[in-house]
Amino acid sequence: MPKDESEITIEIGNLPGISARSDALKSYTGEDGEVATPVPGGKPYRLVAVSFGLLCILQATLNISMRLAVYNSEDETSDIDFEAIFKNVTEERDELKRKLNIFANYSRQGWMYFNDSFYYISSQQESWKYSRNDCLQRGAHLVIINSKEEQQFTRQFQKHVWIGLTDRETEGVWKWVDGTLLTTSYWGINEPNSHEGTDEDCAEIKFFDEENSWNDKPCEIQNIWICEKKVVLT
């Protein structure tokens, strides 16, 4: 029996269970299909895709149910524009399907969703400049951390990772890759310090067990990196 075109399906294959945070590392698949460097906290963020889909379906169901309840309570002789109702519900359905398709597409490529942004964690180590260019080629940028919640999110990977912060243009003046000046920072103790006179013009997450986890480092050193792309789905 053919499926109704309006049906929204969500395939859940080998969905891992939710467990307490452990030291074990979880792996994910990168955009090019290769298995990327394992990262901690993979399960909770992977589950966001399923949760988002279920919430969207629940929202649509509630919207329809509430409307039917209102219309059924009205006088039977009142005029009801069923064509307009159907049009509105269809538009809501199509919008939800569009959001789910966007989410599924990014998830298949190894991106993770958090607070209106998708994040991609590299599977190799490269210089800060290479890392920035890679993010640009993906239509994204090196991660810009502008909230305490995002800082906590990036620490979850427990890896030394490049972030989109540098003072290469003017020594001591730290800017994000979008040109904005650094205002709220999470530098580690005595950082940034250009250790032993070394030219350390790029920022990384190093002390990931601490909230203040940033460190300045020579831009030529090789790290993995995090790309960020703003995509509002709500």
Image (cartoon, rainbow, N blue to C red):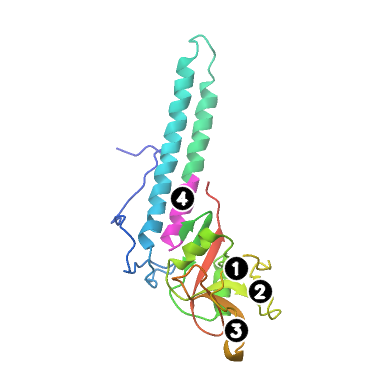
The magenta segment is: 98-111
Q: Main secondary structure of the magenta part?
A: helix
- Quick one: label 2 or label 3, which is nearer the N terminus? 2
Secondary element type, mark 1? loop
Of 60 and 85, which appears nearest the observer? 60
* In contact (CB < 8 Å): disc 1 and disc 2: yes
Residue named by callout 3? 200
Which amino acid, mark 4? Asn
- Counting other residues with Cα less than 10 Å from the Cα at mark 2, is it few (<14), some (14-19), or many (20 or more)? many
Residue named by callout 2? 174
Secondary element type, mark 4? helix
Of 108 and 230, which appears nearest the observer? 230
Magenta segment includes 102: yes
Q: Please report the residue visible at 65 percent of the width from the left and 68 percent of the height from the top.
A: 182
- Quick one: label 4 or label 1, which is nearer the N terminus? 4
- Quick one: label 2 or label 4, which is nearer the N terminus? 4
**Camera-side mark, 1 or 2:** 1
**Camera-side mark, 4 or 1:** 1
- Quick one: label 3 or label 4, which is nearer the N terminus? 4
- Counting other residues with Cα less than 10 Å from the Cα at mark 4, is it few (<14), some (14-19), or many (20 or more)? few
Secondary element type, mark 2? loop
Toward the front, the furthest residue is 189
Residue named by callout 1? 185
Mark identifier at residue 101: 4
